[in-house]
Every structure is written in C-alpha cells, then in structure tokens.
Amino acid sequence: SAVISQKPSRDICQRGTSLTIQCQVDSQVTMMFWYRQQPGQSLTLIATANQGSEATYESGFVIDKFPISRPNLTFSTLTVSNMSPEDSSIYLCSVGRLSYEQYFGPGTRLTVT
Amino acid sequence: KQEVTQIPAALSVPEGENLVLNCSFTDSAIYNLQWFRQDPGKGLTSLLLIQSSQREQTSGRLNASLDKSSGRSTLYIAASQPGDSATYLCAVTSNTGNQFYFGTGTSLTVIP
C-alpha cells in the first residue's frame, strides 16, 4: 500500500484566482494521477503526472487550466488556474502500485465563490 | 469508450443483512477491477482488487467476484454493520494500464 497526504484539505477561493494542491507519498512511485470529483458525481481522471516530463492530460483537460508538476517520485502538485464556480470539486491524487492497484489521498475540497 | 455502471444508486438495509452491490462495464478488455469505499467528503479506500484472470477475491466480510466475459462484478457484504455506511465505487483499468474508469457509485446506509 501507500500513505498519501494532500494539502490543503479544503479551501474556499474567489473566482479568477489560482490554487495549488500538493500531494506527497511516503515512498517512491512511478505512477501518480490527479482526479476531479464534482458534486454528486464519480471520479474523472484529469491527468497522469510524469516525473521529469510534461503531464499527460485526458480529453477535456488542458495544461493552461490545470498545470501539473512532478519534480520527483514522491511529490506532485496540481494547480487549478483562473477558477470559476464550476471548478468547485474534490480533487484527489492517487498512485498506482503493482498490477495498477490504485491508492488515493484524502482529497482536497475546493469551493469557488 | 468504456462505461461503468453501478446498480442500485442507493441502498438502505437493516443491520445484520447480507447485501450485494453490482458493477457492470461495457468493454471486457480490462486489466483489473477494483472496489473502493468513500466516506462523505473523503478520499477513496481500496477494498479489493481482482485481476482479469481471477474470479473472486475475499477480505473479511467482503467478497468480490468478476465475470469478465459478461462485463460484471459484484461486491458481497456479509452481516452488514452501521460502520459499512458509505459510497462504494468500482473502477476498471484498461488493458494498456493507463486508463481508469469509475462507476457512479452505490450509496449504502446500514440502519442500526
């Protein structure tokens, strides 16, 4: 398994600002992912965070809106840029272990006013 | 594109009952299927992982089965307890290992 922490756990932000979410893992992992869970919805994969190279974004998500950094094998950040109320969601990071088993962080609850 | 569906969307049972949650997927070309639990406003806790070559996995009072050819999985919870109240999500991993698809979840309430 893996122990994953996220900061902040929650935040309330104003429209037009940006928020950076941090994800820290207790051991080195190759696969790290960022998800969004909108209110009452299931999880949608935003991107795969690649160490040493640009993240791989899923359809509908772009780097200008959700820049991701992955400076090493235990840490990643997701920035939600130029926020609007539609960005209010829970943002989750996860890591993939052997056989692609995923483990999730506690999530960051973002409210945009 | 893979679609994952969970039925029922919500379930309420009295404590002590055995129950079954269902998950179906449209593309049988999967690498594995994973069941998660999510408490309100929290992250996901992994419950069981079934590889595509396996038929079932067990952990305590939980048993998950997989019928890949028919695109179905079930999560069986024995002797339910109020602490089991949560949303249960299933997720499938594509054969390539780089795509993950989540169901919409089943919200379970166990009444004391």
Image (cartoon, rainbow, N blue to C red):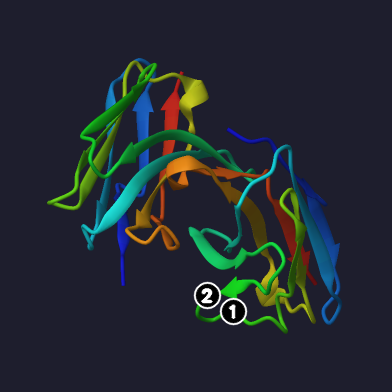
Residue B81 in percent (x, y) is at 44, 19
For residue A58, which numbered disc appears in the image?
Answer: 2
Q: Residue furthest left?
A: B70
Residue B87 in percent (x, y) is at 47, 41
Can residue A107 be seen in the rendering of this structure? yes
At horizontal 57% and vertical 75% (from top left) the residue drawn is A57
For residue B112, which numbered disc appears in the image?
Answer: none
Q: Are the two marked residues, 2 and 1, in contact with CB atoms closer than 8 angstroms?
A: yes
At horizontal 78% and vertical 78% (from top left) the residue drawn is A81
Q: Which residue in the structure is indicated by mark 1?
A: A61
Label 1 sits on what residue type?
A: Phe
At horizontal 83% and vertical 52% (from top left) the residue drawn is A8
Q: Secondary structure at mark 2?
A: loop
Residue B109 in percent (x, y) is at 44, 33
Residue B98 in percent (x, y) is at 45, 62
Instruction: Report the front residue among B9 and B64.
Output: B64
Rendered view: B53 above or below A113: above
Rendered view: B14 above or below A2: above
Q: Is residue B62 left or right of residue A10?
A: left
